[in-house]
Amino acid sequence: MFIGHFAVGFASKRFAPRTNLGLLMAAPVFLDLLWPFFLLLGWEKVGTDHSNTRFSRFDFVSYPWSHSLLMAVVWATAFALVYYAITRYRAGTVAIWIGVVSHWVLDWTTHSVDLPLYPGSQKVGLGLWNSIAGTMIIELLLLAIGIWMYVTATRARDRIGHYGLLGYIAVLLLIYISDRFGGPAPSVAAVAWSGIIGFPILLLWAWWFDRHRVLLVGDGA
């Protein structure tokens, strides 16, 4: 799951309009923000030369500290508590907590049996990635719904708000297609560093164009 996570971020703006989209995007991809660092530290492992599903090019050997259900709840709670301590914005706090946990739920639907419930537990996964067409239809549909919810909750106030969003969507789709149909990753380090560099750029980009859009819905609680 890739653009499905970004779909959650887009959709969250309707429920927490005062929270910048950059933070709302950070929540559903937060586990993937942690994962590259854990790979480089050797705490988690991934294979890059094959996969046990038709869609993914990776073999997720072990990632209990970033992607188990228990740790997803822990990371979600930590992120949400820090956000609430700074903002006191309850709607944003709930959206961030749900966003982080949604990552595990969406991965559970797509991954094979490789997601732990907690470190050292049995692993689960429904295996949507075994169908390339099914995966792409569902992810693209999720993205379309998320974008629709975002653009009906906000309106561009200038060219940055308009074209910044369009460019963002185009880049997400380009990454999605190239990741699926491109060649294998050269190394685990390359996978890790692409995430360490790429995700912050995408989050800052979302923060930037969202500041150039105005709200069309109430500001939440």
Image: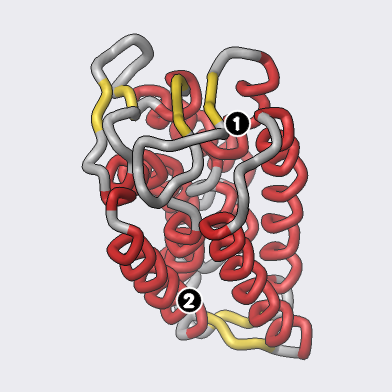
On the image, the x and y values in percent for residue 125 come to: 26, 36
Q: Which residue is mark 1?
A: 34
Mark 2–mark 1 distance (CA, rounded to whole Å): 25 Å
Give the image location of residue 92, x and y in percent.
Answer: 49, 54
**Within the image, what quadrant is residue 104 found in?**
top left
Residue 71 in sight from this viewpoint? yes
Percent across and percent down for residue 67 are 43, 29
- Taking depth in this image into account, of 90 and 107 the one nearest to the observer is 107
| Above-or-below relation of 146 to 65 | below
Q: Type of residue at label 1?
A: Leu
- Residue at the spot 67% in from the left edge and 65% down from the top edge: 206
Q: Count residues near mark 2 (Cα–Cα under 10 Å), then give few for <14, some for 14-19, many for 20+.
A: many
State the image quarter where residue 184 is shown. top right
Amino acid carrying label 2: it is Ile
Q: Name the residue tied to disc 2.
A: 147
Which quarter of the rendering shows the C terminus?
bottom left
